[in-house]
Amino acid sequence: IDVMAFDPYNGVYDPGRTYYRSPESLYGNPLRVAREAGKPFAIAETGSRIVVGDSGGRKRAEWLADMADYLRANNALFVTYFHSTRDGHWLLDDAVSRDSWTAQMRRSKK
């Protein structure tokens, strides 16, 4: 095994959720597991619906930036956003979320 990759999602089983989990609470356990195994870690898939009460997606845009900062600071090898409608509406189809994610990807190391 060269890298351990995980698929954590905000509210995957709770479509009525009204909050975005903090990056540490969502990604902390996968990070800990990979570190305990002595392996690099990555996020194979992640995402969040726009939560109830976040009309326009501004809070999700902030969550995306916080998530990217957390994963970058903890040396994630890669992160893939699950831009899909499978089992929910995970699309970044609001401008503020899309712009936030685009800005984070431009900050990433090449």
Image (cartoon, rainbow, N blue to C red):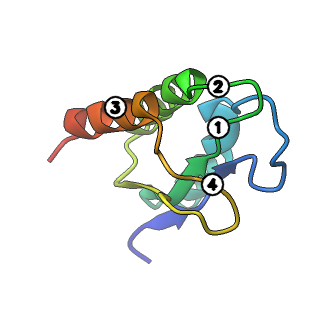
Q: Secondary structure at mark 2?
A: loop
Q: Nearer the viewer, mark 2 or mark 3?
A: 2
Estimate the spatial distance between the alpha carbons at disc 2 and disc 1, rounded to whole Å.
Answer: 8 Å
Q: Nearer the viewer, residue 92 or 36?
A: 92
| Residue at mark 1 | 50
- Residue 56, above or below 5: above
Quadrant assignment, res 87: bottom right
Q: Nearer the viewer, residue 63 or 15?
A: 15
Q: Give the class, few, some or many, for how many residues have Cα within 10 Å of label 3's Cα (few <14, many ≥20).
A: some
Give the amino acid type for the residue marked by disc 2 in the picture: Ser
Sequence-first disc among 3 and 4? 4
Q: Earlier in the sequence, mark 2 or mark 1?
A: 1
Rendered residue at 50%/66% (across/down): 4
Q: CA distance from mark 4 to mark 1?
A: 8 Å
- Read off the residue under disc 4: 89
| Disc 2 target residue | 55
Q: Residue at x 84, y 49 (%)?
A: 14
Q: Nearer the viewer, residue 9 or 110?
A: 9
Q: Do callouts 2 and 4 mark residues in contact (Cβ within 8 Å)? A: no
Disc 2, disc 1: CB below 8 Å?
yes
Q: Are marks 3 and 4 in contact (CB under 8 Å)?
A: no
Look at mark 3 in the image and give the residue it sits on.
99
Q: Is residue 89 left or right of residue 18?
A: left
